[in-house]
């Protein structure tokens, strides 16, 4: 028997709104989280990228928010501007489709703070979705009324509680009332992050925090072996052979991102370089163009690996392997969103094969050895 949203005590408005979005049944993480979240339990949720974590916390927020009060009631913290904007857009869509007057605002850095203050006064959002630096700044300026916030969500908690960001994230939490609810989610949660969360929370309910993070089972993992100097040629040949609908190519440094993009565009591939040097506006414009299909390929650092939710990304390429083990999970999770399938392709040298073995062991996956020959993708044994 299929699980239904009706079983989760959500309002009929929310369920109708979800149906307008083509969502008729909850994912596993949603089914596990929604009821205890409605009961104001503190929750730590770990589930593979693309499994529906965002709605697992937004749906209870919508159900609990008192829209008759023009005050801030929930705060969602996100590690990147792109993810904050994406979550805020989902809030607006759900509000529209469910005919519920839940207001929201994205609060991010590198944007005129005075304009944001004016928007906060005008909108008086029920839900704020923001980056931690700007949110703390506005709390300290008393423009965000922390004492009315009843729920804080830490999205990508392993990122927001790392050594560089933990002090800011904790400072935000400390400004809120002690009886507020705290929800934390990520595709992978380290032991030290889990310990931190337990210290911050009241008897938290822990979902899917096993010994090993889970990779979306709908992703196929392929490996192409070559010399380092041949990596780009192999990439180009694979792209020609499979003609991906949408793809993200991950490269570790900005110079190589630019070079890879220039070469691909020379070979008539519609692609764009995503790196830390481009402006926030250009980055958002590129993501929007990628969403609507004007751009088919993004060449990126791990900047877009966290939380970017774009439909129909069919292929992920690792021209460079990620510097951290768990980043393979986050990168690969940009494909196979929802119930879709996808392919993650690692282009590696002989010396990097042992790293693939570590991925196989850590994530319980298996790489299929492939080669590109005569315009076709073949098994290495052929």
Image (spheres, grey):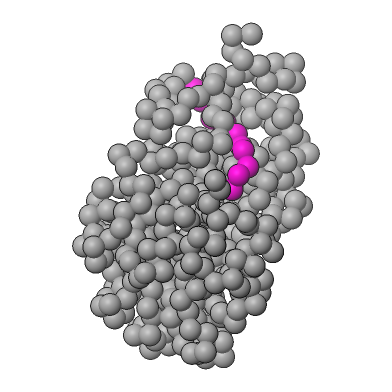
Instruction: Judge by depth and name the residue closer to the eye, 266 or 246.
Output: 246
Residue at coordinates 54% horizontally, 21% vertically from top-left?
368
Q: From where the camera sits, is residue 379 visible?
A: yes
Q: Is residue 347 above or below residue 325?
A: above
Q: Is residue 222 above or below residue 77?
A: above
Residue 342 picture location, percent across and down:
61, 37
Residue 51 picture location, percent across and down:
51, 49
Report the quarter where the C terminus lies.
top right
**Magenta segment: does it hold 57?**
no
The residue segment tinted magenta is 338-349
Residue 351 picture location, percent across and down:
42, 21
Residue at coordinates 48% horizontally, 62% vertically from top-left?
8
Residue at coordinates 69% horizontally, 43% vertically from top-left?
246
Residue at coordinates 45% horizontally, 29% vertically from top-left?
365
**Magenta segment: does it hold 344?**
yes
Q: Is residue 214 above or below residue 365?
A: below
Total number of numbered labels? 0
Q: Report which quarter residue 318 is drawn in.
A: top right
Residue 67 picture location, percent across and down:
52, 85
Give left or right: position of 128 versus 212.
right
Give left or right: position of 369 versus 142.
right
Instruction: Judge by depth and name the residue closer to the eye, 314 or 355.
Output: 314
Give left or right: position of 30 versus 152.
right
């Amino acid at each position: 028997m299929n699980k239904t949203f009706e079983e989760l005590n959500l309002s009929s408005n929310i369920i109708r709104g979800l149906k307008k979005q083509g969502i008729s049944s909850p994912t596993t993480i949603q089914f596990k989280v929604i009821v205890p979240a409605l009961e104001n339990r503190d929750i730590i949720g770990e589930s593979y990228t693309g499994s529906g974590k965002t709605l697992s916390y937004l749906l209870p927020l919508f159900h609990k928010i008192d829209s008759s009060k023009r005050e801030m009631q929930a705060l969602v913290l996100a590690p990147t501007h792109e993810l904050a904007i994406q979550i805020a857009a989902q809030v607006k869509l759900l509000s529209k489709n469910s005919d519920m007057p839940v207001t929201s605002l994205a609060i991010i850095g590198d944007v005129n703070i005075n304009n944001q203050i004016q928007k906060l006064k005008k909108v008086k959002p029920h839900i704020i979705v923001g980056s931690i630096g700007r949110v703390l700044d506005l709390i300290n300026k008393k423009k965000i009324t922390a004492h009315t916030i009843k729920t804080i969500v830490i999205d990508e908690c392993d990122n927001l509680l790392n050594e560089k960001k933990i002090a800011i994230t904790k400072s935000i939490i400390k400004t809120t009332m002690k009886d507020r609810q705290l929800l934390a989610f990520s595709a992978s949660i380290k032991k030290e992050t889990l310990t931190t969360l337990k210290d911050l929370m009241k008897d938290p309910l822990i979902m899917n925090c096993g010994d090993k993070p889970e990779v979306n089972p709908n992703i196929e993992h392929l490996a192409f072996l070559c010399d380092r100097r041949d990596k780009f040629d192999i990439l180009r040949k694979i792209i020609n052979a499979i003609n991906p609908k949408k793809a993200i190519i991950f490269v570790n440094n900005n110079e190589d991102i630019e070079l890879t993009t220039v070469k691909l565009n020379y070979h008539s591939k519609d692609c764009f370089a995503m790196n830390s040097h481009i402006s926030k506006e250009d980055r958002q414009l590129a993501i929007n163009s990628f969403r609507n299909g004007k751009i088919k390929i993004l060449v990126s650092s791990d900047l877009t690996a966290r939380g970017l939710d774009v439909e129909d990304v069919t292929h992920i390429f690792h021209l460079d392997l990620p510097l951290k083990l768990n980043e393979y999970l986050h990168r690969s999770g940009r494909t196979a969103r929802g119930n879709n399938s996808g392919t993650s392709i690692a282009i590696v040298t002989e010396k990097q094969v042992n790293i693939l073995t570590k991925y196989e062991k850590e994530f319980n996956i298996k790489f299929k050895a492939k080669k590109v020959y005569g315009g076709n993708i073949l098994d290495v044994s052929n």
